[in-house]
Amino acid sequence: MKKSVLTRYRVMAYLTAVMLLILCTCMVFKYGFDTGADLTLAVSQVHGVLFMIYLVFAFDLGSKARWPFPKLLWVLVSGTIPLAAFFVERKVRAEIEPLVEGALAPADA
C-alpha cells in the first residue's frame, strides 16, 4: 500500500473532526444564543463536503487494507461523532503504518 493512501485519509480525518467540532460550537451559538445562523450554514456546508471526501478516502483505505465490513463502517461513521475521528484515526494509523510500502527497512543494508 502506498503511503499517500494513509496520508490523505489522515488529513481528511483531522479536517473532518475539526470541522465537526466547529459545527457543534456553531450549533450551540445558533440554538442556545440565537446568533450565528449564517455562519452555522456555511460551516455545515463545508463540513458536508469535507465529510464526503473523507468517506471516499476512508473507503479507499479500507478496501486496500481489506477490512471487514463492520470495521469499515465504524471508520466511516466516526466522522459523524465529535472527537471519535481523532481516536479512530490514531488506531487506524497504528494498524496501517506497518503495511505501507517501504515501512520495513532491510536488516542488513
Image (cartoon, rainbow, N blue to C red):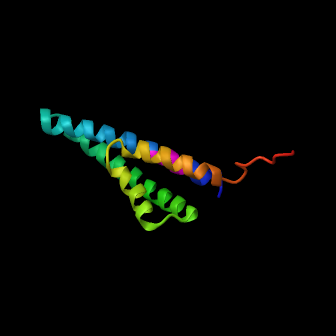
* 86 left or right, relative to 66: left
Question: In the figure, is residue 106 to the left or right of 90?
Answer: right
Tell me what residue is drawn at x 42 percent, y 42 percent: 86
The N terminus, quarter of image: bottom right
Q: Is residue 20 left or right of residue 40?
A: right
Give coordinates of residue 22: x percent, y percent: 32, 37
Numbered label tally: 0
Judged left or right of residue 88, residue 38 is left
Toward the viewer: 98 or 57?
A: 98
Q: Position of residue 3 (x, y in %)?
A: 64, 51
Type of secondary structure dominating the magenta stretch? helix
Residue 17: image location, x then y, percent: 39, 43
Q: Nearer the viewer, residue 16 or 39?
A: 16
Residue in view at x 37 percent, y 51 percent: 78
Magenta stretch in the rendered image: 8-13
Tell me if I can see residue 43 in this picture.
yes
Identified at 44% across, 48% down, the residue is 88
Q: Is the residue 33 above or below the residue 58 in the image?
A: above
Residue 39 visible here: no
Inspect the magenta stretch and tell me whether residue 81 lies in it.
no
Say above or below: 2 vs 90.
below
- The quarter in which the C terminus is drawn is top right
